[in-house]
Structure formats: structure tokens, C-alpha cells
Amino acid sequence: MSVTVTEKSQVKNKEKKLQEATSSKNLEEVLDKVKKLDNTCSFIKCKNRTNDFAIECKYCQGRFCPTHALPEIHGCGEAVRKDERRKYLHPNIKLTEEKHSQAQTKLNMKLRQMQQERKSKQGFGGKGKKK
């Protein structure tokens, strides 16, 4: 079962609160407010503290409590779906150094073979030309 709620409606808009927190001239007060903002769950109606254990979403960069940590719960389900589909359709296969050198050697041998075949064909090309 997937939740199809947009990210913006489920994740707090911390930018506005951050601007309010930094508007003060007192540095200690600003630091306390920013720390408090950073240590609460980013889910819209959640007031849980995340100072002990927070999970950062790699899609929206929000910090969430364990209850709202899954991207599908806090509104990044569509981003997850796109990312997993991309990974499945276009896997990023890495070759080891040994396999890479073997493939390079095989390619070089094939290129030399094709070059030799072209040279041998060039010897026969002069007699069969039409004018």
C-alpha cells in the first residue's frame, strides 16, 4: 500500500521558521531556536525530538523520527519509485580492475584481427574495380 500525498503537504516548511529564528540580534537566542528547529521531526504534525536518533531522507533532506522515517510515509514515495525504477532499468555495473583489464585485452585483440582482415582485403580490391 502506498501513500500518494505530495511532499510539500506532509513536510514542515522549516525555511519560514528558520528565518523567524534568525531574525533576532541575540546570538544565544538564535542558536537555541535553530537547535530546537533542527531537533524536531520534519513531519507536519509530529513534535517528536530527533536529537538522539534522527533519520535524514536522501530525497528531501528532511530529518525524521523513526515513525516517519520511511520516504513513503512522509511523502517522498514518488521520488523513491522513480529512483528505484531508474536503478532497475539502468543498472550501474562496475567492473573490477582484473575484469576491466581482461576486457581491454580482448578488445585490443579483436581490433588487431579486424585490422588484419582489412589489410588482406585491400590486396584484392584493385583487380575487380569497374570503370
Image: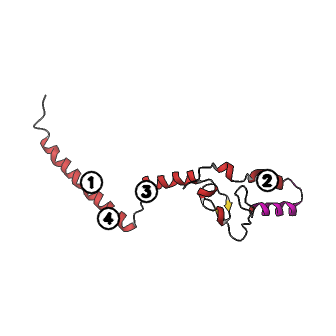
Name the residue type under label 3: Pro
Residue that appears at 87% across and 64% down:
28
Note whether 108 is above or below 121 in the view shown.
below
Q: Which residues are magenta?
A: 23-37
Is there CB contact under 8 Å for labels 4 and 2? no
Of the two numbered discs 3 and 2 in the rendering, the one whose residue sits closer to the viewer = 2
- SS label for mark 1: helix
Residue that appears at 68% across and 61% down:
63
Of the two numbered discs 2 and 1 in the rendering, the one whose residue sits closer to the viewer = 2
Q: Nearer the viewer, residue 77 or 85?
A: 77
Q: Which mark is residue 102?
A: 4
Residue 114 point in image, percent of width and height: 22, 51
The residue that label 2 is drawn on is: 17
The residue that label 1 is drawn on is: 111
- SS label for mark 3: loop
Name the residue type under label 1: Leu
Magenta stretch containing residue 30, yes or no?
yes
Name the residue type under label 2: Lys
* Dot 3 or dot 4, earlier in sequence: 3
Residue 34 point in image, percent of width and height: 79, 60
Magenta stretch containing residue 1, yes or no?
no
Please tell me in which quadrant of the rendered image residue 65 appears.
bottom right
Residue 39 in the figure: left or right of residue 71: right
